[in-house]
Image (cartoon, coloured by chain):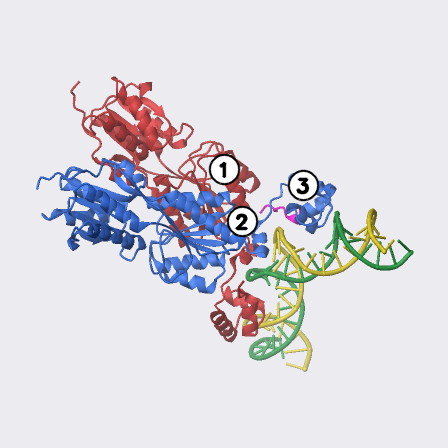
Chain colours: A blue, B red, C green, D yellow
Amino acid sequence: MEKTVTIKDVARKANVSISTVSRVLNNSGYTSASVKEKVNKAVDELKFQKNMVATAMIKKQTSTFGLIIPDIKNIFYGELTRAIEDKAHQHGFNVILCNTDNNLEKEKEYLNFLLRKGIDGIIFSTPEINDRNIREVMKSRPDLPMVILGSKVQNVRLDEVLVDNFDGGYTATEHLIDLGHEKIGYIGGQQDSYATVERLKGFKAALEERGLPLDKKHVKLDEFKIHSGYEKGKEMLAKKDRPTAIFAGNDAIAVGVYKAARELEMKIPEDLSVIGFDDSQFAEIVDPGLTTIRTPIAEMGEKTVELAVQIIKENKNFKESIMFPPTLIERASTASIKKVH
Amino acid sequence: MEKTVTIKDVARKANVSISTVSRVLNNSGYTSASVKEKVNKAVDELKFQKNMVATAMIKKQTSTFGLIIPDIKNIFYGELTRAIEDKAHQHGFNVILCNTDNNLEKEKEYLNFLLRKGIDGIIFSTPEINDRNIREVMKSRPDLPMVILGSKVQNVRLDEVLVDNFDGGYTATEHLIDLGHEKIGYIGGQQDSYATVERLKGFKAALEERGLPLDKKHVKLDEFKIHSGYEKGKEMLAKKDRPTAIFAGNDAIAVGVYKAARELEMKIPEDLSVIGFDDSQFAEIVDPGLTTIRTPIAEMGEKTVELAVQIIKENKNFKESIMFPPTLIERASTASIKKVH
DNA sequence: AAACCTTAAGTAAACGTTTTCAACTAGGTG
DNA sequence: CACCTAGTTGAAAACGTTTACTTAAGGTTT
């Protein structure tokens, strides 16, 4: 047990009171040049570091955010988290990572912990559209800065930063239609996820606008994961009345579709066009490169933190909804349909 | 500004002193059943939650770990971090995420922050073999639990959990030799990384043991990243005296090699065998599936946390070095050499 | 020269807990 | 009946800061 050096030790060494030390440390109030010097010298010599939990105690600020995501193993959240952590660090905040697996009970546990630890704000990036925990926190701590990233939550008015999922779904589908595809499948994530729903809406809108029928067999929802893409893809592609193109709800699902196609000996893009969503690392890795709708992940993460910081520092909360535009990234997984039929 | 409810409010409501409340809350010392009941009732009614920063102040425990990694975007660290966070959560700890990009200055900043926040322990998973920051922390805070994950650090005696990199390198190389390859390349990560060095040693040892010459042109080090594998792979494969198999220092490098091979119109595994390291998500995604050396990432992460918790709770520090065995995972990227030459 | 700023520095309270110490009860012991 | 002890509670100190309040010196204004 080393004796940690406190402000008291500095005060003693510099022959001043602790309040004086505090003042020069924070340079607040009046302090003479000579005293400043003495104190700084003592600080240096003792290698004094301010204890932040004491500061937190009195100021009620911990310079810490809670970040709530489903799973950091998921590459999408890896990219998001990195952007968030970087921006937070720039502003002098640390982030506590919480993986909930979309489990509301687990989320609740984490929230309890975070609140008791006095975090300065929470960033939610959970797909769940109906998150009662968030509402509860809002009720018990209406002052606490919270921002929702990548999703909307029902009956909740909070700052939120989003990608335009409807537009992305529309663009993806339009791209396939432009290539001549008429039978297009959609494999989406959780059905109670905002992204799934909006992308599906965009999908349907594009079909309708172009006068193409919607085949319910060709719409399947599961999870935003590789195995979902694989399983649903196999189901969808095994039948003879199969689509010639698949719009995958995200890149991971697209990867699963690749695997399914490979097993069924279908060539991408010759026999099947595939388009993903997010433009995650997966999109570049697979062969052929995945055409996808780019979500500006890093920009969104950064913006989220900036909002949170702004709420904290300026104490203004506009409850904004900021929508980022997605963009089509064309690689090699989509192609003109061969009218062999 | 909501008035947060404190132990004082509970005490008032239950008509007892705050010390009594504290005692029933922590059930320490003597408390009568009747008082216990009164207090618990008040706690429930007021929805009292103990403020952990006050507790931290006095107990000098924050139930928080710092986790230092290069980059959470890197899929390897994603998997590691998830395992760590899960295990930490099980033990009632939160983790503060720190991305250093292997930048020692950045690492130092983070360390300062963590120390001032009174974290209970630090988990380092940095490849850097010569990390002066760690030594400095050990000097200034010899009591602070620290565990190193996945690497050794020079002149530092700390708990460490490792995969047997030498063995992995040896096994990978042996596998290729067994398949008849005689010209084998090695593309590794940072040259001052423990993993790089040890895997290379294993590589060399296997070659030597089997009487194969080491061609220096076929050993290239860069970073544990896709683009490194791509660039070094292209350099190595462009020459006519090219290897028939490549041992990639990790899966990301292997992915880069895939890309290089594709551009050079070499088929894997027909024209080139590739073996990776880690068995990350990438290994299953690529086509053909990547043969690789499995690092038990999750197990290692969990063990690391368990060590840290043990040091904290039992206050015993054995400075153990725990070595996990890697295993060969055969997929489709390695094959017998065709003796076409 | 009295009254009043301005600058400077110290005293002490406060933040919300835990914990030591003291005090008081009731029952048991000699 | 005096004394001890185990059980139960409260008062107050402590953790390491920040900050409101106080005091004091010196200069400026009247």
Residue D14: image quadrant is bottom right
Residue at disc 1, secondary structure: helix
Using the rendered image of the protein, determine whether residue B285 is visible from the camera's viewpoint.
Answer: yes
Query: Is the residue A289 above or below the residue B239 in the image?
Result: below
Specify the farthest residue to the left: A341
Residue A285: image quadrant is top left
Q: Of the residues shown, which amino acid type is indicated by label 3?
A: Asn
Q: Read off the residue under disc 3.
A: A40
Q: Nearer the viewer, residue B25 or A163?
A: A163
Q: Main secondary structure of the magenta part?
A: loop
The chain holding disc 1 is B
Q: Read off the residue under disc 1.
A: B106
Q: Nearer the viewer, mark 3 or mark 2?
A: 3
Picture coordinates of residue A85, whole percent (x, y):
44, 45
The chain holding disc 3 is A
Q: Of the residues shown, which amino acid type is indicated by label 1?
A: Lys
Residue at disc 2, secondary structure: loop
Q: Read off the residue under disc 2.
A: B118
- All told, the count of numbered labels is 3
In the image, the segment drawn in magenta is A1-9
